[in-house]
Image (cartoon, rainbow, N blue to C red):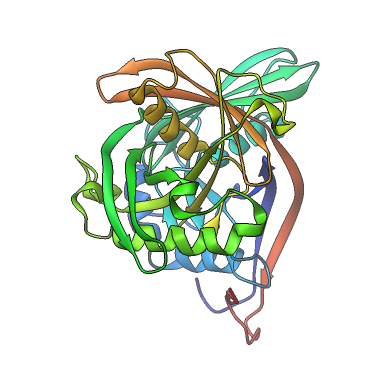
Amino acid sequence: MKAETWDIGTVDYHTAGEPFRIVPAPPFLIAGETVLERRESAMTGDADKLRRLLVNEPRGHADMYGGFIVPPNDAGAHFGVLFWHKDGFSTACGHGTIALGAWAVRSGRVRAADDGDTDVVIDVPSGRVTARVGVAAGRVTGVTFRNVPSYVVDRDVEVKTPDFGRLRVDVLWGGALYAALPAQAAGLDVTPSNLHRLIDAGRQVKAALAGHPAAHHPSDTRLDGIYGTIFHEPVGPDSGLELRGALAQRNVAVFADGQVDRSPCGSGTAARVAALTDSGELAYGDVLDHFSIIDSHFTARVADHSEAGVVVEVLGQAFPVGEGKFTLEADDELGLGFVLR
């Protein structure tokens, strides 16, 4: 983008507390024939400048998340999206997909009846996903995110961390690669009071897996790399939380470079369901109650099987929080902004 005054329109949502800033009409074409190719193009140039403008302070913050609406791969999807955060562009985002489903129906981009379910089909870098939007009396009542196939990549991988010693993690695919382990293995609970320690542990686990064979996608190097670390713990009947499923857990995903998901993490939830199904802890069709570090809530289950893995559906809700027009003037000395944390 040229050094000139420009204005960017956004629609902001939150899914279970996690922000998602939608850019319905990016002011330029991002090159590529597919969304995955567009992600490669977006990593440099104008798209990355726009990402930084909308994430960085003073217009955003270190835990901001969002997406650029782009053309789909073909006519089988309603639109495509490039997900972004403070450190770049991700391959998947379940909470963002839930937000996009709600936005598409609320905005009229995808027509929906006043009662019933409407599928919003979205091309993302990791594949094609669906947000099934439930509507009753014209109001969105929930969104079911149907993910790409999820599976266990590797079990019981040992990593050595500076501050938490030797840990053993499972590496999982849910549209992105995650390392997952019980929070107690690192001497932690999934509570806001442990936030900084959880961030430190998540960063150290991710760093320890850099270059590990399990951090490579089996078929596409563009999807390589551990995206986040998931710390999980059981939730019992004495928790005071409303439990509806066969199994209940709390988790926090520390992703990118120390970002913390306020929601239970959509793609991370799908990855955890794959792991729990693989271990026999969650039977086919049983529901997982998945809580976040702030006790916001998703439910999830295996909806189907494929040769590539289990197809997981994650039910959540997203709400609009505002609309904005973000401005950068040519003489703004802070330019694209900064990240203090």
Q: Position of residue 22 (x, y in %)?
A: 61, 48
Residue shown at the point (52%, 37%) measured from the top left:
266
Question: 106 and 161: which one is in front?
Answer: 161
Q: Image quarter for residue 88? A: bottom left
Q: Quadrant of residue 132?
A: top right
Please indicate, yes or no, whether residue 63 appears anywhere in the rendered image. Answer: no
- Choose between 89 and 255: the one closer to the eye: 255
Classify 74 as above or below 264.
Answer: above
For this orientation, the residue located farthest to the right is 137
269 and 64: which one is in front?
Answer: 269
Q: Position of residue 228 (x, y in %)?
A: 42, 51
Residue at 22% from the left image edge and 59% from the top image edge: 211
Q: Nearer the viewer, residue 94 or 272?
A: 272
Q: Residue 167 appears at what percent x and percent y?
A: 34, 53
Q: Is residue 130 left or right of residue 242?
A: left
Q: How many marks?
A: 0
Against 300, residue 67 (above or below) is below
- 326 over 149 or under it: above or below: below
Residue 267 sits above or below residue 179 on the image:
above
Residue 205: image x %, image y %? 37, 58
Q: Quadrant of residue 106?
A: top right
The quarter of the picture where the C terminus appears is bottom right
Task: Name the residue rendered at 66%, 58% in the picture.
Answer: 193
- Give the residue displayed 37% in from the left and 20% down from the top: 280
Residue 286 in view of the camera: yes
